Amino acid sequence: MRRVIIHRVLMMVGVALALAGCGLADSRSPAPEFMRNKAAKPPPPEPPPDVKRLVREKLDSMFTAASNPRRVRVSAPVREVRGTGWTACVGADLTSVIGKPLGGETYRITICDGTITDRRRDDDCATETYEPI
């Protein structure tokens, strides 16, 4: 009698393990199409940001107050090659910490969800067309 109970318990454990593996497969698995999860849809592209407004509102985070940015200008936004954000170029005439004019400096900014997330010096921005803010 004891062997029969052990045998049935082992059979139920085996069936439970077999059924646990019957979940839907990942969208990239080699399982047949009807057994796979649907691939997640990419997020919709965000509309082009208002770069002039963003830079005007965040000018203090773009440049230090001591740099005294003058003739600030921006380029049109361009969609990032990889990702869902946008990039744009910002140019300004700056002053060094000791008060000596640095001349024109250009930066490439990254914009995601209407927020400036990154700013880097970029000499490739020289070919862009700019508009004053």
Image: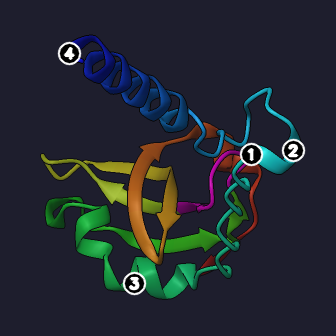
Left or right relative to 116: residue 85: right
Q: Which residues are magenta?
A: 80-90
Measure how far apart labels 3 and 4 are at the Cα level: 82 Å
| Residue bearing mark 2 | 33
| Residue bearing mark 3 | 56
- Is 81 colored magenta in this rendering? yes
Q: Are marks 3 and 1 in contact (CB under 8 Å)?
A: no
Front residue of 10/63: it is 10
Q: What kind of residue is marked 1?
A: Arg
The first of marks 3 and 4 along the sequence is 4
Please, which residue is most extreme toward the front here? Answer: 1
Q: Residue at x 43, y 61 (%)?
A: 93
SS type, badge 2: helix
Where in the figure is residue 49, as x and y percent of width and height? 59, 80
Q: What kind of residue is marked 3?
A: Arg
Q: Is residue 133 visible?
A: no
| Residue bearing mark 1 | 36
Residue 2: assigned label: 4
SS type, badge 3: helix
Q: Residue at x 40, y 31 (%)?
A: 12
The first of marks 3 and 2 along the sequence is 2
Measure how far apart labels 4 and 2 are at the Cα level: 45 Å
Where in the figure is residue 11, as x and y percent of width and height? 43, 23
Where in the figure is residue 34, as x and y percent of width and height? 84, 50
Instruction: Please state which of the two labelled residues, at mark 3 or mark 1, is closer to the viewer.
Output: 1
Front residue of 1/45: it is 1
Measure how far apart labels 3 and 1 are at the Cα level: 48 Å
Measure how far apart labels 4 and 1 are at the Cα level: 42 Å
Q: Are marks 2 and 1 in contact (CB under 8 Å)?
A: yes
Q: Residues within 10 Å of mark 1 (few under 14, many from 20)?
A: some
